[in-house]
């Protein structure tokens, strides 16, 4: 009985270690370069309220299954739809440290009734002070 109990305890311990190791999710500090170069099509909510080229905006998703909004300061000015929204939802679920937000800037504009395109803004590293 003693050897059997030891073997079962070892198996339980190994199983617990494997479970804990599988729960550890290591992610990088920065968004991968391929994610930074992706452009996302956005659609204005009100075609009378648009922003110029190179305007910094924030892509924001309130909850996992809510719409993906594009915010200018605290006002929603556009939304991301269809496949692009699904890509962003996957990105946000894979990267919880983003807190369902990503800073972007407008890289291509058309007519107000056409989609415009945004791209992620790379965060600059702080310079070391001597």
Image (spheres, rainbow, N blue to C red):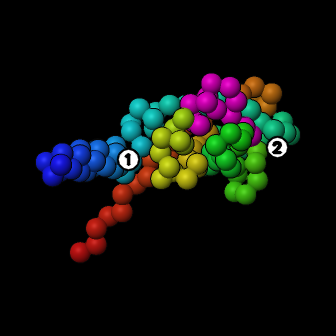
CA–CA distance in space, label 2 to label 1:
45 Å
Q: Are marks 2 and 1 in contact (CB under 8 Å)?
A: no
Residue under circle 1?
A: 23
Binning the other alpha carbons within 10 Å of mark 1 as few (below 14), some (14 to 19) or many (20 upward) gives few
Image position of 9 with respect to 112: above or below: below
Q: Is residue 6 magenta?
A: no
Residue nearest the observer in this picture, 43 or 23 = 23
Q: Secondary structure at mark 1?
A: helix
Residue at horizontal 56%, vertical 31%? 87
Q: Secondary structure at mark 2?
A: loop
Assign the magenta stretch its main secondary structure. helix
Residue nearest the observer in this picture, 41 or 129 = 41
Q: Earlier in the sequence, mark 2 or mark 1?
A: 1
Residue at horizontal 23%, vertical 75%? 130
> Among all residues in the image, which is located at the extreme left?
3
Asked if residue 114 lies left or right of residue 118, the reply is right
**Among the 4 quarters of the image, the one containing residue 81:** top right
Q: Position of residue 74 (x, y in %)?
A: 73, 57
Residue at horizontal 59%, vertical 37%? 89
Task: Give the extent of the magenta segment.
Answer: 78-89
Residue at horizontal 75%, vertical 25%? 114
**Among the 4 quarters of the image, the one containing residue 108:** top right
Q: Position of residue 107 (x, y in %)?
A: 58, 35
Asked if residue 83 lies left or right of residue 121, the reply is right
Kindly report which numbered mark, 2 or 1, lies closer to the viewer in this rendering: 1
Give the label on residue 49, or none: 2
Q: Is residue 88 magenta?
A: yes
Give the label on residue 76, or none: none
């Amino acid at each position: 009985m003693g050897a059997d109990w030891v073997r079962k305890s070892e198996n339980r311990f190994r199983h617990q270690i494997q479970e804990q190791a599988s729960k550890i999710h290591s992610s990088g500090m920065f968004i991968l370069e391929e994610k930074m170069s992706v452009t996302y099509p956005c659609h204005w909510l009100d075609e009378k309220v648009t922003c110029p080229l190179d305007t910094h905006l924030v892509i924001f998703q309130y909850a996992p299954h809510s719409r993906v909004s594009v915010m200018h300061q605290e006002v929603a000015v556009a939304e991301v739809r269809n496949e692009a929204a699904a890509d962003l939802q996957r990105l946000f679920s894979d990267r919880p440290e983003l807190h369902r937000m990503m800073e972007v800037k407008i890289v291509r504009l058309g007519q107000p009734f056409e989609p415009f395109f945004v791209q992620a803004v790379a965060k600059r590293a702080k310079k070391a002070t001597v």
